[in-house]
Amino acid sequence: MATPEPNYDVLVDVPEQNIQIRKYAPVMVAEVMEQNGENNAFMQLFRYIDGANIAQQNIAMTAPVTQQENIEIPMTAPVTQTQAAEKNVMTFFLPSEFTPKNTPQPTNTNITVKRKPSEVFAVIQFSGLMRDKSIEEHRMELEKYLKNQAIEPIGPYLTAGYNAPWTPWFLRRNEIWFPLNPETEYTQN
């Protein structure tokens, strides 16, 4: 049985490069922000969908799990000098039946549940283990494609993993996502 994924439309498909531009439908997500070096976001989110929520409701696992790394967030007052802390955000997409009204609230205050609006992403897909070298190689390939198409990302990239940890490396589906302006019309060149 396939793992549910967020709904999207393919606006541009470049199969020879494993690149697509996708428009995702609005979706409910659960997110955890953590400092670089911490490594417990996945388990916090997993516990949430496994019933650690006010309704004690189990929520089906969906794919992908996304992670945005090294987000700089300025510190707030009363600091007299602006500082930045590197953060990572891990996101679980919730099944499509969840809305702002019926999504169980987490018991863990580190978890934020919210509705993401419709978003557009440039995506490159690859298999194997999601290692730094592979991420960098595919990120650069997607950036090159976007530059050649005169498309400017509107934010930092995300990594998206679709498989359970026990999935053999050669069967894994990974992606790099760059957010794009949802107001722009994207067409196949």
Image (cartoon, rainbow, N blue to C red):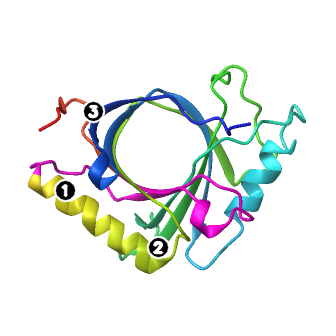
Q: Amino acid at mark 2?
A: Ala
Residue 147: quadrant of the picture: bottom left
Q: Amino acid at mark 1?
A: Tyr
Q: Who's the residue at 59% across and 52% down the image?
A: 162
Q: Are marks 3 and 2 in contact (CB under 8 Å)?
A: no
Residue on which disc 3 sits: 182
Measuring from the top left, give residue 99's x and y in whole percent.
Answer: 64, 22
Q: CA distance from mark 1 to mark 2?
A: 31 Å
Residue on which disc 2 sits: 85
Q: Nearer the viewer, mark 1 or mark 2?
A: 1
Q: Who's the residue at 17% across and 51% down the image?
A: 152
- Residue extent of the magenta highlight: 149-177
Mark 1 or 3, nearer chain start = 1
Vertical relation: 107 (above or below) 187:
below
Q: Who's the residue at 35% across and 36% down the image?
A: 22
Q: Amino acid at mark 3?
A: Pro
Q: Callout 1: 10 Å neighbours few (<14), some, many (20+)?
A: some
Q: Secondary structure at mark 1?
A: helix
User: Magenta includes 132?
Assistant: no
Residue on which disc 1 sits: 145
Does the rendering let one see residue 84?
no
